[in-house]
Amino acid sequence: MSEANEIKTSLFSQAGKFIQTAEGELDLVILPTVQALNARWAAGEYDDTYYLTSNGVEPRPPNPARLVGSDLLDLPCPCTITINGVAYACEDDHAELEFDQAGTYRIVVSKWPYLDAEFGYENPAQ
């Protein structure tokens, strides 16, 4: 295999989510891998901050969610709010967070294709 025939590609799920990058000859490596994974592909080296649309590879948009005090605002609906590893479905554009124990909480708001929004919240001792 000559380097001139090798191409770098990025593989994406049918929904457009990044899977991995691959390098090799189109007919011997790339296309068989795409078929085996039931994937789509695009020339170039990308990562999970990109997604594949009908217009090509695009950067994933920033998540509009904001943490103001103990309230999450501007949530993309529906979304998933993960607090210290426990996921909660959210069907609203805001959420009032309540914590019964003091400590630092890691909050992640997820909604495809947005990038995850991550926040830290410090709940004071009572």
Image (cartoon, grey):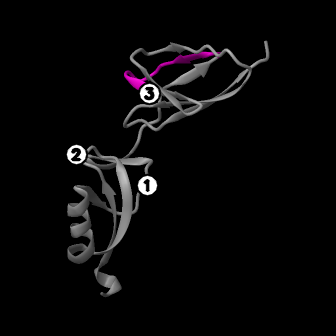
Looking at the rendered structure, which numbered label has been put on residue 47? 1
Residue bearing the label numbered 3:
80
Q: Nearer the viewer, residue 50 or 94?
A: 94
Looking at the rendered structure, which numbered label has been put on residue 121? none
- Tell whether label 2 touches label 3 (CB within 8 Å): no
The answer to whether 108 appears left or right of 13 in the picture is: right
Q: How far apart are marks 3 and 1 (CA)?
A: 22 Å
**Looking at the picture, how far across and down is residue 114, in whole percent?**
42, 35
Disc 1 versus disc 2: nearer the observer? 1
The answer to whether 45 appears left or right of 122 in the picture is: left
- Residue range (magenta): 69-80
User: Height in image: 110 above or below 24?
Assistant: above
**Looking at the picture, how far across and down is residue 29, in whole percent?**
27, 73
Residue bearing the label numbered 2:
54
Figure quadrant of the N terminus: bottom left
Residue ID at (27%, 43%):
15
**Looking at the picture, how far across and down is residue 58, in whole percent?**
35, 47
